[in-house]
Image (cartoon, rainbow, N blue to C red):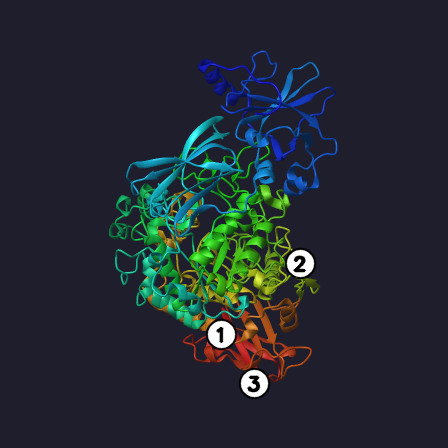
Amino acid sequence: MAVGETGASAGTAVENQAAEAIQAFMPDARAYWVTSSIIAWNVSDQEGSSVCLYASRGAALHLSPANRGIQGYDSKVELQPEHAGLPESVTEKFPFISCYRAFRVPSSVDVASLVKCQLVVASFSADGKHTDVTGLQLPGVLDDMFAYTGPLGAVFSEEAVSLHLWAPTAQEVSVCFFDGPVGPVLETLQLKEFNGVWSITGPRDWENRYYLYEVDVYHPSKALVEKVLADDPYARGLSANGERTWLVDINCETMKPPSWDELADEKPKLDSFSDITIYELHIRDFSAHDSTVDCNSRGGFQAFTYQDSAGMQHLQKLSDAGLTHVHLLPSFHFAGVDDIKSNWKCVDECELAKFPPGSYMQQAAIAAIKEEDPYNWGYNPVLWGVPKGSYASNPDGPSRIIEYRQMVQALNRIGLRVVMDVVYNHLNSSGPFGITSVLDKIVPGYYVRRDIKGQIENSAAMNNTASEHFMVDRLIVDDLLNWAVNYKVDGFRFDLMGHIMKRTMMRAKYVLQSLTRDAHGVDGSKIYLYGEGWDFGEVARNQRGINGSQLNMSGTRIGSFNDRMRDAVNGGNPFGNPLQQGFTTGLFLQPNGFYQGNEADTRAALATYADHIQIGLAGNLRDYVLISHTGEAKKGSEMYTFDGLPVSYTSSPIETINYVSAHDNETLFDVIGLKTLTDVSVDERCRINLLASSMMALSQGIPFFHAGDEILRSKSIDRDSYNSGDWFNKLDFSYETNNWGVGLPPSEKNEDNWPLIKPRLENPFFKPAKRHILAVLESFVDILKIRYSSPLFRLSTASDTKQRVQFHNTGPSAIPGVIVMSIEDAQNDSPQMAQLDANFSHVVVVFNVCPHEVSMDIPALASMALELHPVQVNSSDALVRQSAYEAATGRFTVPRRTASVFVEPRR
């Protein structure tokens, strides 16, 4: 095996003792094998001390009773200190261990064999007594020796099928073929290894078989060599619940709906990423309650093929107004929902409807079956590359593949591109057991990110993945290519993008945007990427390398969610007191009784929020200069949130996703219900809802809306409805109800706030009627039409934004609660400014969040030919039609809680 001593053979009793002892003396893995020749360990440097590496292929290592060292090893290697320290390539990849000592592994050592063993390093004092011992983390050496760019998964040719599995630490690998999705084993065949990749080639009639890999591999979590059964990480088909991988050629004609190969010709027009507006939608929410969809198709992929359904007609209405993209919550194979529909348990909604609006009975009924019902958001990834079986008519065979493609096709045909929500930052499970553990079964400890003691990091929910490792990065990019090419997905939203390395994000962008219609049937230049750039956990402040956080992604042309604008509009943040008010919810102007400071404090806070919103309206550009409420001219990056973070961070408007609500946290209507003064009427809450949405729709950047924002959607004030069933997540495209007051939200995430929530749900004056829902929907459609009536609302560059967008009610004398934004176009093309809009030479938007009408003179906007936008002239909202402009003085009159848009038509 390796150069060094050979340990004595041990009998079964000794091996059992060793297995028990190893747990006692080696609960961690504090050393890192970072290259084939270097091990890093933060061990003390004492005179005369030595360090040795031990290996046991059978996992028999244990500590000798006399404290004289390690026993049960097959191989022992003395390591020499590397006084020059760790090489720069290592500290760049693993910055958090840059101060560790470096030890050299002799060149004669068979590293490829050792990485298949149980491994420890031990230090010894000058008198030979061991002073420390720990296991090793192997991703560095695996990347150094086994980084691989060849074929993985199933590869089909005319005559044969080959299987390829990257598993450099495996001792043996076989493939087990089964008789169908639930039948017995037909045969087991051994794979051969070359440089860490195990492969086998067989006849073409292997196609459509079901299989699993059987892998013999050392698992550090158990300190044992385990024989595990695992799906193919590159699976493109599965049986129900991922019990087995289906060996499918996804490109064969039987997997394609009619005209699938011509879909590139039918893609909705997209001239620029600045033209994007996003609508975030959960697949089950879309149709679970839609009686116009066949009951067998509700809640799944097929519901989108019902062109005349209430839901599709609703999406068509939004598309006609300008909406461009539908963002679908996770639709890959995730845990938490059984794929077999006959196993589902459901509540009797007719019975739940009998309980009072503030009752705890509804949530108790949901909680009782939440692990067995058909609902989950899906942020529990198991296998990234296969559509979720519970959304298909049949989880076995081709249905999930064909129906996913039909869904994309149907949405494209009503003018909507499809964004896939991808969750590459964590895995549902790890370890050698359990059907939902795949990657960690095959190469234990590699795909997950571990702390300096070897424990798996869980800051991203559970089992954080490590895209800084070569083959994790590769799997992510390969998976994105799978969805972009094989399913013709038009964009990707990255869950917790900050937990993914920036290098991975940039490589993904380059590879995706290099796709061409001629070579791949896809125009990759139209694929847009965005994600959650939150900077927290073990990756915060680039501790694990430069990560995909908001500040780091500036200049990449990849979008990130703008929480600064969200918090300024709503007030507080999702983790603070739910009564904290913001710019639209009554701060200073209509206090709700929750103390946020004295009158001067709240007025200053309102003005600060106005600054943050104006920066957001200007694309959240870090170099945009605004006259702040103090009167100083400041760049957005020189302003700070109440948490001390720079307000703005983008280099281009397309790098900001402007939003006020998403699937996480309460819906917009529920936020407003919590934060506004309880005496505010439902009519006024509806106006606030529309006003907040209007700020997003009329901003530079990418507006983003949670499904139902436009119809006052409520989840009965549930702050985290990920597992709250169809009941709390209901979307009603008949517009009869908005789902307010369907019981106290589930206790798991909401019980502490029940005393606040209950009286609101029970107050009949909080609940909107159908006329409210329809009125807000119509006005929302109007705002979308206004956005797409002028390219001035969709500027694509920072220079255009800084040159054309101005704010006028600024500085210490600003009227509280009013934002005035103007966007200028050239009268004619000139070297200083190009003409963009053939219809309007100037646009002015006035946002009045005050509970009363406001009139104000803006001298800089006097003597213009401004008039109310034609869409608002014809609006069904009588209040917005009262908006007025007087050219002589530049006076704007805007009704309460209204966004008024004025335009200067070209003559």
Q: Which amino acid does label 3 sit on?
A: Arg
Residue 508, how many percent across, how many down? 55, 54
Above or below, 845 relative to 715? below
Residue that extends furthest to the top in the rendered view of this protein? 66
Residue sitting nearer the eye, 695 or 76 = 76
- Horizontal and vertical percent position of residue 186: 31, 37
Residue 526 image point, x, y percent:
51, 64
The image quadrant of residue 366 is top left
Q: Distance between the residues labelled 3 and 1?
A: 17 Å
Q: For this rendering, which residue is in front, 717 or 113?
A: 113
Name which residue lies at 30% across and 44% down.
365
Sort mark 1 into few (<14), some (14-19) or many (20+) by Cα contacts within 10 Å: many
Residue type at numbered disc 1: Ile
Question: Alpha-carbon distance for marks 1 and 2?
Answer: 30 Å
- SS for callout 3: loop
User: In the rendered picture of this protein, how many numbered marks are placed on residues?
Assistant: 3
Whether residue 33 is visible, yes or no, is: yes
Q: Which residue lies furthest to the bottom in this view?
A: 907
Q: Mark 1 points at which residue?
A: 786
* Amino acid residing under circle 2: Ser
**Residue placed under numbered mark 2 in the picture:** 637
Kindly identify the residue that appears in the image at 54 percent across and 33 percent down.
455
Mark with earlier residue (3, 1): 1
